[in-house]
Amino acid sequence: MIKLSKLSDYAIVVLSCLAAERGQLQTAVMLAQQTGIPEPTVAKVLKLLSKKEIVNSVRGVKGGYSMTRIPDQVTVTELIEALEGPISITSCADSEIESDCHIAQLCPMRGNWNKVNSAVKSALDGMNLSDLLLPVSPQRKGGRA
Amino acid sequence: MIKLSKLSDYAIVVLSCLAAERGQLQTAVMLAQQTGIPEPTVAKVLKLLSKKEIVNSVRGVKGGYSMTRIPDQVTVTELIEALEGPISITSCADSEIESDCHIAQLCPMRGNWNKVNSAVKSALDGMNLSDLLLPVSPQRKGGRA
DNA sequence: ATAAACCGGACTAATAGTGTACGGATTAAA
DNA sequence: TTTAATCCGTACACTATTAGTCCGGTTTAT
Ligand code: FES
Ligand code: FES
């Protein structure tokens, strides 16, 4: 169905909150309350994002998360790869890893999905986080809806 | 992981065989033998393709399948949608169907994945089946490898 | 020392995808 | 008219992936 997981979706939501208060540290709990996403899930998303250095994490008592860059500097490709792993359209599309394709020997287009793959990837490279943040930036941030 | 299912992959393989003998009818069994893909699976792929009129099916004793158009006339978008259903990057990306998103009320980018979605779709629209058929067109077709 | 907060990984349940099977419909040919 | 080849549609079991949660460990301000 060529869709990505919900985690990416959540990530955008969480990042929106973070982007609204750039520089400020916000804890996972705070973000969970603002977004309505369950806390453990928010934590998971944040962990993934920090691994790819899209957000910055500070441990310890006054810790929390903040964005490392402005939204324009975060490509959609980065986001998706942080949440879902490398973008590869098919099992045998990735670089040269055709191992798990059991018909590779007689496949007439071995690896040609790569073209599709890079087409998609460059489409994604052309977009960044600020394209995804709604023009609803200055909204109140404490309440629920 | 933003990848599509194996069925799409198989579809290309099967279509390659079909494209090599354009106009000729070929049965699911023949195609299965040529491709090495199990027959029931080939049949499934063919059914999906015929539903979207990418291949033409003829029933009855001398029946079989053939391509309806030349490969240049079949976009990758069509192919993928035939095999995997509509291309929608997230649950709430499709037109206006945000029903299954339980945080839609407070989501700051409700539906903005649509931008990503159309970027991907147009990348895919720009490619067609002949881009995926390897330059190995005039190969013998009876044997296995 | 204590408590707030992140880190890493493991675990379970739910969902989606893979591959197969079966009964039915259609049609050329015997 | 009967038969057999062939597609059609759907339904099913099996497997892989994803979603969501939990827990013990580490860091750090007070
Ligand atoms: S389908 Fe895997 S190599 Fe072609
Ligand atoms: S995440 Fe679904 S509407 Fe925003």
Image (spheres, coloured by chain):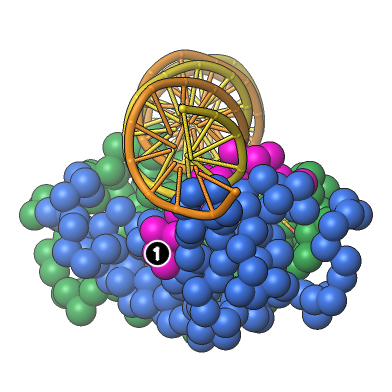
Chain colours: A blue, B green, C yellow, D orange
Along the viewing direction, whichever of A58 and B61 lies nearer the viewer: A58
Across and down, in percent, residue A47 comes to 47, 51
Mark 1 lies on a secondary structure that is: loop
Beta carbon of the mark 1 residue lies under 8 A of ligand 2: no
Protein chain holding label 1: A
Across and down, in percent, residue A124 comes to 50, 77
Q: Is any atom of residue B9 visible in this view?
A: yes
Across and down, in percent, residue C22 comes to 50, 15
Residue A39, picture quadrant: top right
Neighbor class of circle 1 (other Cα within 10 Å; few <14, some 14-19, many 20+) is some
Along the viewing direction, whichever of C26 and B78 lies nearer the viewer: B78
Residue A104, picture quadrant: bottom left
Amino acid type, mark 1: Lys
Asked if residue B82 is positioned above or below residue C14 in the image, the reply reads: below
- Residue drawn at (70%, 72%) of the image: A21
Q: What residue is shown with label 1?
A: A52
Residue A105, picture quadrant: bottom left
Along the viewing direction, whichever of A47 and B28 lies nearer the viewer: A47
The C terminus of chain A: image quadrant: bottom right
Point out the stretch of residues depicted in magenta: A36-53
Q: Taken as a whole, is the magenta stretch helix, strand or loop?
A: helix
- Residue drawn at (47%, 52%) of the image: A59
- The verdict on residue A51 being magenta is yes
- Residue drawn at (46%, 72%) of the image: A77
Asked if residue B16 is positioned above or below residue B145 in the image, the reply reads: below
Across and down, in percent, residue D20 comes to 62, 34
- The verdict on residue A142 being magenta is no
Direction from residue A97 to residue A90 in the image, left or right = right
- Residue drawn at (58%, 53%) of the image: A62
